[in-house]
């Protein structure tokens, strides 16, 4: 027995020593354990068009997939769809049945809606456990021809811009050359054209810059300790604006990404930390859509360390790189986008080129994978007139799943980044990664083994209705009380439940139409 205990103790010491000697593997295991406990759902809503008249019917189809693999899900059975006004208040709401990764429905746009820009949003009950930024959202235009559009006090004639600066990796550190990305948009979230100047505290011009596309761009400079830097932004036809750059730290880490060619990615770590010794290690974790791809370690030499890897080991879409210092604290982050290549190819068209009025139109479609092998496909198609009011939609399923759904904020013309292969597009997508960083979790929670607090259960059977039973006399919650719910219809439904210790009772409505 003593030998067995001694052997177990030595084995435990060996495991602990291995874990301590491989911190990147420990970080990777913590990340994997966290992700295995948190289901990520994504919804994409395809509307029949993006411009409507009041009184029309808005038709839509929902695609419901798992967030990491983008494969169809069949867990949540209900999706919530709502139309929001400019103040993010719902003006229309509906519930939609989901089955085997899809659902469909419609909304009548009433004549009471005024002409304006609206947002259509879709989410599940389970998705309410996470930030609303992960809900699907899309902009729609509605015109009411019965009422003249009135100017409101909230629509100021003075143009206002949102201008932000983003140091690569997250930090500006004295004495280390850094790339600084910028983003300048108007009140509608559209990028603006402007000229910019970076000034020192003595008003010396250090850098001149302008956006490359959609109000986004980047410049490079080396900050000096003790200096404050300002940027002057001069929009076309508007007054100049002066913005402060983020604080320059005396100590810290920077992380820069480059593609030297031959399908490789190079991430360079630089530090001005006085605590960085000659043998200090730094660790890099990379994941694509919450799937672990990279766990590496490098030693700092004269304040620098380099990670080099093949781009082929990363998944398609956005990869999030996180840098950890020697005591496994996250200190820098950088996003990288890998354009998807193994796509479903859809071809087809009508059988004729011209048709008579009200003549039946047959459309033939074929779907195949990247190897030209025919595939089954879940599709939706909208037919409408292209004119001065109705244009082709700017967002599609592909750009949403691989790009928009994993970035924070509004992305202008997301389809541009996937439909073009030029050097200009490659630079623009890298600027996008620098200005729209986002993560679905906090590393502090991952390292502590904490999972998000679940307040909303997935509706895996049908619609969940909940309520509270109280005592009529005292108003206190009434526990252990039998309750019943009836749904009178052509097919009547009847449900029962018992209140819990807080008086809460819940019914699962199935099937839901």
Image (cartoon, helix red, strand yellow):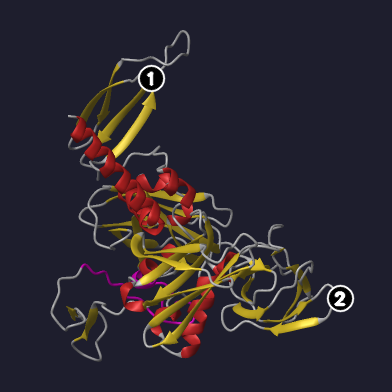
Distance in Å between CA atoms under marks 2 and 1: 67 Å
- On residue 392, the disc is none
Foreground: disc 2 or disc 1: 2
Q: Relative to residue 34, is residue 234 drawn left or right?
A: right
Q: Is residue 500 above or below residue 113?
A: above
Q: Which sits in the foreground, 333 or 214?
A: 333
Q: Relative to residue 369, is residue 269 drawn left or right?
A: right
Q: Which residues are magenta?
A: 378-399
Label 2 residue SS: loop
Residue 374 at least partly seen: yes
Q: Position of residue 159 (x, y in %)?
A: 72, 70
Q: Residue at x 39, y 72 (%)?
A: 399
Q: Position of residue 51 (x, y in %)?
A: 46, 70
- Direction front: furthest residue: 3
Mark 2 highlights which residue? 202
Considering only order in the chain, which callout, 1 or 2, is on the residue closer to the N terminus? 2
Task: Give the image quarter of residue 155.
Answer: bottom right
Q: Which quarter of the image is occupied by the C terminus? A: top left
Label 1 residue SS: loop
Q: Is residue 131 above or below residue 417?
A: above
Q: Position of residue 14 (x, y in %)?
A: 30, 48
Task: Give the image quarter of residue 468.
Answer: top left
Q: Residue at x 35, y 30 (%)?
A: 466
Task: Give the image quarter of residue 461.
Answer: top left
Q: Is residue 481 above or below residue 403?
A: above
- On residue 503, the disc is 1
């Amino acid at each position: 027995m003593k030998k067995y205990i001694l052997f177990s103790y030595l084995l435990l010491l060996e495991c602990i020593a291995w874990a301590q000697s491989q911190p990147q593997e420990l970080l990777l295991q913590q990340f994997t354990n966290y992700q295995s406990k948190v289901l990520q759902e994504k919804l994409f809503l395809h509307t029949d068009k993006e411009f409507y008249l009041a009184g029309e019917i808005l038709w839509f189809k929902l695609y419901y997939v798992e967030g990491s693999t983008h494969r169809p899900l069949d867990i949540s059975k209900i999706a919530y769809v709502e139309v929001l006004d400019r103040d993010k208040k719902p003006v229309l709401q509906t519930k939609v049945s989901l089955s085997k990764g899809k659902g469909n429905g419609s909304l009548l746009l009433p004549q009471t809606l005024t002409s304006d820009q609206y947002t259509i949003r879709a989410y599940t009950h389970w998705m309410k456990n996470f930030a609303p930024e992960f809900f699907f959202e899309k902009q729609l235009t509605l015109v009411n021809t019965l009422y003249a559009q009135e100017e409101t006090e909230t629509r100021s004639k003075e143009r206002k811009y949102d201008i932000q600066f983003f140091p690569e990796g997250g930090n500006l550190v004295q004495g280390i050359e850094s790339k600084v990305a910028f983003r300048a948009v108007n009140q509608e979230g559209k990028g603006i054209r402007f000229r910019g100047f970076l000034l020192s505290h003595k008003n010396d011009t250090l850098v001149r810059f302008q956006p490359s596309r959609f109000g986004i761009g980047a410049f490079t400079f080396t900050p000096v300790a003790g200096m404050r830097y300002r940027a002057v932004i001069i929009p076309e036809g508007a007054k100049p604006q002066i913005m402060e750059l983020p604080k320059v730290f005396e100590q810290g880490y920077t992380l820069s990404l480059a593609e030297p060619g031959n399908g490789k990615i190079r991430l360079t770590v630089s530090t001005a930390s006085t605590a960085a010794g000659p043998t200090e290690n730094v660790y890099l974790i990379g994941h694509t859509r919450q799937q672990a791809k990279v766990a590496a370690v490098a030693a700092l030499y004269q304040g620098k360390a380099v990670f080099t890897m093949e781009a082929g080991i990363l998944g398609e879409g956005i990869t999030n790189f996180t840098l950890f210092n020697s005591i496994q604290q996250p200190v820098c982050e950088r996003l990288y986008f890998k354009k998807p290549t193994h796509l479903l190819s859809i071809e087809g068209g009508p059988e004729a080129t011209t048709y008579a009025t009200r003549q039946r139109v047959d459309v033939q479609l074929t779907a195949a994978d990247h190897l030209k092998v025919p595939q089954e496909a879940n599709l939706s198609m909208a037919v409408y007139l292209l004119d001065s009011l109705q244009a082709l939609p700017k967002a599609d399923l592909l750009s949403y799943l691989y790009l928009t759904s994993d970035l924070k904020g509004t992305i202008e013309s997301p389809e541009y980044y996937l439909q073009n292969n030029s050097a200009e597009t490659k630079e623009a997508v890298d600027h996008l990664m620098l200005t729209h960083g986002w993560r679905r979790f906090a590393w502090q929670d991952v390292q502590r083994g904490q999972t998000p607090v679940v307040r909303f259960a997935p509706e895996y059977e049908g619609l969940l209705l909940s309520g509270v039973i109280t005592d009529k006399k005292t108003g206190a919650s009434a526990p252990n009380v039998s309750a019943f719910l009836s749904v009178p219809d052509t097919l009547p439904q009847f449900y029962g439940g018992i209140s819990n210790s807080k008086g809460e009772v819940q019914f699962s409505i199935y099937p839901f139409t």
